[in-house]
Amino acid sequence: MSRNDDLFERARAVIPGGVNSPVRAFGSVGGTPRFYVSAAGPYVTDAEGRDYVDLVASWGPALVGHAHPEVIAAVVDAAGRGLSFGASTPAETELAEEIRRRVPIAQKIRLVSTGTEATMTAIRLARGATGRDLLVKFSGHYHGHSDGLLAQAGSGLATLALPGSAGVPAPIAAQTLVVPYNDEAALEAAFAEHGENIAAVITEAAGANMGVVPPASGFTTFLREITSRHGALLISDEVLTGFRSGASGYWGVLREAGEDVAPDLLTFGKVVGGGLPVAALAGRAEIMDLLAPLGPVYQAGTLSGNPVAVAAGLATLRLADESVYARIGHAADTVSAAASAALDEAGVPHVVQRAGTLFSIFFGAEVAGGVPDYETATRQDAAAYAAYFHAMLDAGVSLPPSAFEAWFLTAAHDDAALARILDALPGAARAAAA
Ligand code: PLP
C-alpha cells in the first residue's frame, strides 16, 4: 500500500470520508487524495515526496504562491507577539483600510473567519435592514454552507450532484428562492410574485463554483436595477473573486468593462486571509452600522480579526500589486490557450471560460457552445474531465479534483512551472479523448 493510501485509510477511520471538506475526497474523479506535507511557490509536495505544480492554490488564497517569504515572516512576527487577544489590534484596521482602498464602495468592513460566516451575516443584515425574509440566489452559485444557502449550490454539492443538504428545515429552505443565472426573465418573475418580501439577491460576482461562468454583459447592472426598483439589497459575493480575478476583485473587472455597479453589501474571503482564516463582510456604511454594537443585527466571533491571520492577509494584499495580477493574467492566458489547443488537437470538444484571471474548461459537445448557467454546466462530460485530471496528476500537475471548479494560478507560476504544465497538456488531452 502506498503512503498516500495508508494515510487515507487512517484518515477514513477517524474523519468522515477521510477529509475535512468534501471536494478534497476525489469523489468525482476517483482515486486516492494526495496528502500534502509542504508547499512552496507554485509547488505542493505529497507525503511520498512527489511534487506537483499546483493549480488549486488552496482553492484561491495562495495568490502570491505558497509560503511566500514575506507572508511567512509577517505570520511568524505576529505569532511571536501573541496568537489571539480577543481585543482590537491596529492591524485589523489596516486590513480594513486596504480592502476599502481597493474597493471604495466597501465603506465599512467587519472581519470574520470564513466566507460562510461572511455571507451568513450579510443575509442577516439584509433581512435586518429591510424587515423582509426572502432571499434570492442563483443555481450553481456557492456561498458557503449555512442552512439557507445550500439550495442548488455549486462547488462540492455540484461535484457530488446533490440538490441541497439534508438537515436543513423545510421552513428555512422555503425562505430561499433559486433562479437560473444570467436569466433576467426568471428574476423578473420572482420579483413580480414575491417582490415585497425579498430582502436581497445574493450573487457570486462572477460564477466560479460551477466552473467559471461570468455574468453576461449587462446582467450585474440589471441586478442592481431590479433590486433597487423593489427595495431589496444586492449582495455581491466576492469570497472567491475578491482580489483574485483582479486587484479590485470582479467589481474592478466589471468597472473596467464599463459596468460601474455598487452592490449594497460585499463579501470577501480566501485571498483576504492569504491562507489563514480571514473573511470580511463590507458595504454601505449605513447598512453596516446596523451591526452590533451600533445596531440591532448581532454578529460576533472569538477569533474574528485574529492577529496572525490578519498578518497573513495584509502581507498578501501588500504584495499584490499590478505586476502580480499581470503575471497571473499572463499565466492564465498561457495555460488556457495551450490547454485549448491540445484539446483541439486531440479532438475533444470543450470551451474555456474566463472571469478576469480565473478560468475553467468545460468538456463535452453539449457545452462547447458556452455555459451561461448551472443547468448547462451539469451537461459537461465529467468522465472526460476525470481522465484528464488523472493524466495531469500523473504528469506532476495538480488540478482541482472536480469539473465544477476554477483553475487557480498564482504569481509564483514561473516559466519552469508553466513549462511543466504545458508538457503535460497533450497527454491529458489524449486521455480525455479516449
Ligand atoms: N462564497 C464563495 C463564492 C465561495 O467560493 C466560498 C468557498 O469556496 C464561500 C463563499 C465559502 O467560504 P468558506 O469556505 O471560507 O466558508
Image (spheres, helix red, strand yellow):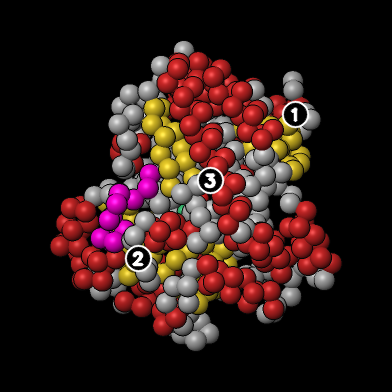
Three-letter amino acid code at the position of disc 2: Val
Residue 255 image position (x, y, % from top left): 39, 61
CA distance for labels 2 and 3: 23 Å
Give yes or no for residue 214 being in the magenta stretch. yes
From which residue to which does the magenta span run? 213-223
Left or right: where 418 falls relative to 184: right
For label 1, the crowd category at 10 Å Cα-Cα, with few meaning under 14, some 14 to 19 and many 20 or more, is few
- SS for tag 3? helix
- Residue located at (37% from left, 48% from top): 214
Query: What residue would you read off at disc 1?
Result: 50
Q: Nearer the viewer, mark 3 or mark 1?
A: 3
Query: What residue would you read off at disc 3?
Result: 329
Q: Quadrant of residue 343?
A: top left
Position of 288 relative to 58 (above/below): below
Three-letter amino acid code at the position of disc 1: Arg
Q: Residue furthest bottom?
A: 294
Q: Nearer the viewer, mark 2 or mark 1?
A: 2
Residue 433 image position (x, y, % from top left): 45, 16
CA distance for labels 3 and 1: 27 Å
